[in-house]
Image (cartoon, rainbow, N blue to C red):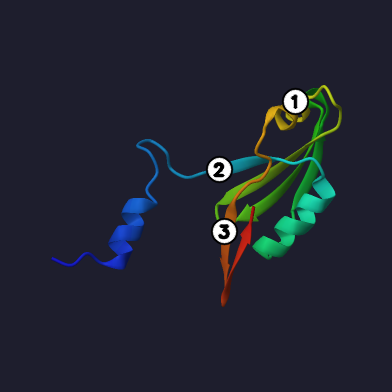
Amino acid sequence: MQTSVNAKHKKMSSLPPGAEKIDHIGIAVKDLDAAEKTYTQLLGVPPYKRETVASQQVVTSFFKIGESKIELLSPTAPESPIAKFLENKRRRHTPLSVWRKRHCCQFG
């Protein structure tokens, strides 16, 4: 019995029971301007919104990808939760592969 490529893809990309979609993925970054440039190049779309969340001492930037969003979070103070997260992580990169037209870009 042969399994179609679409059936395999559907099985691999299914969400957990009760989950309808991925709303957004948050990525902590040190330099928001540099990260926005990189993600704009990789994703082929500019961010649609940037906002400061003073209560969390963070500036966020959002990219819309289909029905989901990528949220970049950059600290505005060294004592912010995002700054502490970045400080405590040994691995400071996010592997991301994006298929675009005739080539595949990889960021990591």
Tag 3: residue type?
Ser
Q: Residue at x 42, y 38 (%)?
A: 19
Specify the quadrant of the image occupied by residue 105.
bottom right
In the image, is 50 to the left or to the right of 3? right
Where disc 1 sits, the SS reads helix
Instruction: For residue 46, say whether it is visible.
Output: no
**Residue 84, position as x, y percentages in the image:** 75, 25
Residue matched to label 3: 97
Where disc 3 sits, the SS reads strand
Q: CB under 8 Å between callouts 2 and 3?
A: no
| 56 and 99: which is toward the camera | 99
Q: CB under 8 Å between callouts 2 and 1?
A: no
User: Mark 2 and mark 1: span between their CA atoms?
Assistant: 25 Å
User: Mark 3 and mark 1: span between their CA atoms?
Assistant: 27 Å
Residue matched to label 2: 23
| 103 and 68: which is toward the camera | 103
**Residue 61, position as x, y percentages in the image:** 75, 45
- Residue found at the very far bottom of the displayed protein: 102
Residue matched to label 1: 84
Q: Which of marks 2 and 1 is nearer the N terminus?
A: 2
Q: Residue at x 70, y 27 (%)?
A: 88
Tag 2: residue type?
Asp
